[in-house]
Image (spheres, grey):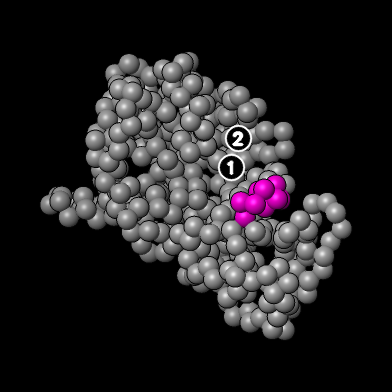
Amino acid sequence: MATIKPFKAIRPTKDKVAFVASKSYEEYDMEERNAILAYNPFSFLHIINPGFKFHKTISGKERFKLVHNRYLEFLEENIFLQDENPCFYLYQIENDDFKSLGFFCATSVDDYTADIIKKHEDTLRSREELFADYLNTVGFNAEPVLMTYKNNPEIAQLLSQQINNTPEYDFTTTDRVRHQVWKVVESDVIHQIQEIFEASEALYIADGHHRSASSFLLREELKARNPSHTGNEAYNFFMSYLIPESEVRIYEFNRMVKDLNGFSKEGFLIQLDTYYRIEEKDDGIYKPSKKHHFSMYLDGRFYSLYLRKKVYDFTDALSTLDTQILYKTILEPILGISDLRNDSRIAYGYGKYNLLKMKDTIDNGEFAVGFSLVPITIDEVKAVADEGLVMPPKSTYIEPKLRSGLSIYKL
């Protein structure tokens, strides 16, 4: 049922790929970003931050036009090339404890509208429209939508055969992550992969809901403007990175709230007692160990919160998610936070040492209370998507995180 297509990627030349590839713009702090822009003329950051050339912060339509100009310059200066034939592009990311192998391809907007491509997050219309305008102006898509598919031994065998070939790219970044890319050029292999996906039931968006929604808006706009529309134009597809679900890692976001909504510490604990069995823990960092079990840090102490399942209604896939349980039993009814996306009283954190960071932030008085959860599983994500439901914001932090600039889809 899922339609995937090879495409002629615009991508860095072999000798410059290690300099071009960048993390996402938001992952750099300002000092690091400016240093890269100052000393690395090949960084993809020059395309997405074109104002640096003019020592000026530029936004809106003006920025979009300059992004397009920097992109053209990379082509003119032979930093980028375009493949002559449509390909799939295998991309493997590897560090000391994690390896993932997926591939870049073009996925169908029609599949997105037909719910063959499954979603689990809400999107903001304003962001959809902004990014659709961006895509229309710059004329390319450089940030793939990360999608998962059910583990398939046939696909695994085909990909494993391909990576026995010499990679097109093979480089290691300063964070000690190895990046390898292989071109799949053989038409028979491409056709085999397409046939397997045509027989699959669904693809699941793991990261990139706004990017896919914006691609739909752009398709609708360009289709309306094109009296000769056939359905085969580039705008009917968007670049995605497909990866087997077993090679996705999901981490949790902690929640931190600035105040107790008028409750004293004791009053707050009494409110929690309705839904939870509460235990104060000994000194030291305390992490939850299983579903429906939360760690709370309050007034210099860690507490374990065990959900009283007899007083909570499990009605669908969404209601079983720990992020939803925390929202429905604590954040909304007790702490008065109904808008998890925009309420300034709540903040989120992730990362290897984030529980310690959460503790330090609360000890410093920036927040009053914090909650830690166990990660949501890929099966839970799929169950919510299959039921057409929407997870609370910041329910998942998903890896792998792909380097930008390795593959560009021309619209």
Query: 323 or 278: nearer the eye?
Result: 278
Q: Check the picture and name the quadrant holding the N terminus.
A: bottom left
Q: Callout 1: helix, strand or loop?
A: loop
- The quarter in which the C terminus is drawn is top left
Q: What residue sits 58% from the left and 53% below the top?
A: 348
Q: Nearer the viewer, residue 374 or 353?
A: 353
Above or below 178: residue 110: below
Q: Position of residue 276 (x, y in %)?
A: 73, 75
Secondary structure type for disc 2: strand
Q: Position of residue 221 (x, y in %)?
A: 21, 53
The residue most toward the left is 227
Can you name the residue that lies furthest to the right here?
Answer: 282
Say whether residue 253 is visible. Answer: no
**Magenta highlight on residue 188:** no
Say if mark 1 contacts mark 2, CB within 8 Å. Answer: yes
Question: Which portion, as a residue range, is magenta?
Answer: 359-367
Residue that badge 2 annotates: 93
Look at label 1 and name its amino acid: Pro
Q: The disc labelled 2 sits on which kind of residue? A: Ile
Cα separation between marks 1 and 2: 7 Å
In x, y percent, where is residue 162? 57, 33
Residue indicated by mark 1: 400
Q: Position of residue 377 (x, y in %)?
A: 65, 59
Q: Earlier in the sequence, mark 1 or mark 2?
A: 2
Rate crowding at label 2 as few (under 14), some (14 to 19) or many (20 or more) other CA atoms within 10 Å: some
* Quadrant of the image occupied by residue 54: top left
Quick check: 11 above or below 1? above
Residue 57 seen in the current view: yes
Residue at figure coordinates x 32%, y 27% from the top left:
56
Give the residue at x 36% y 55%: 213
Q: Which mark is residue 194?
A: none
